[in-house]
Amino acid sequence: MTAPLEPTVRVSTLELFFDLVVVFTVMQLTDTLAEDLGWAALGETVLMLALIWWMYSAYAWLTNAVAPTSTFRRSMLLVGMAGFLIIALAIPEAFGADGWAFGVGFLVVNVAHSVLFLHSAGPSAFRAALGFAPLNLISAGLVLAGGMMPDGQRAAWWGGALVVQGVIPFLRHLGGVSLIAGHFVERHGLIMLIVIGESIVSIGLGFAGVELNGASLLLALIGLSVAYYFWWAYFAGDEERSLAALGAIADPARRAWIAIWAFGHAHFPMIIGIVLFSAGIKEAIPAAFESLEWSGAAALAAGAALFLVGHAVFLLVMGLRNGVPHRLVAAALVLLTIFIGRVDATAQAGAILAIMAVSLILEDLPELVRSRSTNLHTFGR
């Protein structure tokens, strides 16, 4: 059974404005991680991003159900944006002196989300919000309380908040919110474009205090090309296929469940992968033709591999199996480039680029053969 035709709803310019704070958030996470690529810093970054991503996703659900068409709605979105800005400003010292600010920002984000959902949503969405709003606020309370605890206890409190967030879909009936597939897919596509774009910003920031020479420029161009293949993997055809697959699900509860796993959970490793790769590139640029520390080499390789694995999981959840083997094999090969990075940073980045390019081209070759096309101007999607 296919879903009935639903209204065409595009992402509004206010939502795009809202997403701009995500640019700053990702930059803060990347810069903080690049300063210390150790296991503790990585764990803190993953935990912070997980909390932030859950609530950003919640706002994608919110504006899917509640269009920002009134002064009150737009004002509450601005309040939520202010909360995200406070969170982003607190990121560098979130596990230090500014943990309280991270908690305050997280509480503001949650309160604005709950108020807007409960005030403006339709009857079925309102009933759903009555279920998840208290749990979101409990999670926010744990984050705020944890931000005021001694540094060594903060991760436990925030981890508890993440557990509360994670169980919400299992405790509440998901059919209450009628998800508009076109808007939802477009919104997540735009945020992925923003995150991929931030990897290019990281290349530029990596040149602070670094002499421009052939070696550093070559590494920068390789980093740009890897970002292009992130775009290729996500946008070149699969976004349209995922929209068709999500839109074809008639049952609201099943559509919501697929959306949570595909666009919520599976997108998380893609985003943390890009953040990790960006941090690795930023560290590698000053040492373009030199060896990287294990942490830097691992950041480059694991970042690209996480993105590929995350996208493979996304395709599997959406029932789009074509391309999954290519991404998983490429991810395994990319991880092996860690050893190349211990010899030469540029060689490792070049190897990652080659692996991603070949895997994605091989994915498209069967279609070229099937169509017997000799016109390659659209090759590379």
Image: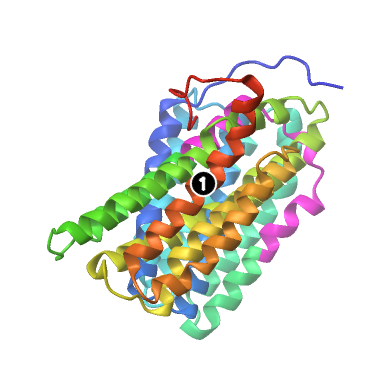
Q: Which picture quadrant has residue 184?
A: top right
Residue 80, position in %: x, y?
A: 46, 45
Residue 114 lies, with reference to residue 300, above or below; the image says above
User: Residue lying farthest right?
Assistant: 1
Residue 15, position in %: x, y?
A: 45, 33
Residues in magenta, as a range: 163-191
Q: Residues within 10 Å of mark 1 (few under 14, many from 20)?
A: few
Residue 66 lies, with reference to residue 298, above or below; the image says above
- State the predominant SS element of the stretch in magenta: helix
Amino acid at dot 1? Val
Residue 114 lies, with reference to residue 73, above or below; the image says below
Q: Nearer the viewer, residue 64 or 144?
A: 64
Residue 252, position in %: x, y?
A: 79, 31
Q: Residue at x 82, y 43 (%)?
A: 173
Colouring chosen for the image of the structure: rainbow
Q: Is residue 313 visible?
A: yes
Residue designated by label 1: 358
User: SS for tag 1?
Assistant: helix
300 left or right of 316? left
Q: Residue at x 15, y 65 (%)?
A: 210
The answer to if 178 sits in the magenta stretch is yes
Q: Residue at x 80, y 53 (%)?
A: 170
Q: Which picture quadrant has residue 257?
A: top right
Q: Quadrant of the N terminus?
A: top right
The answer to if 379 sits in the magenta stretch is no
139 left or right of 47? right
How many marks the image carries: the answer is 1
296 left or right of 238? left
Q: Which picture quadrant has residue 297?
A: bottom left
Residue 311, position in %: x, y?
A: 61, 47
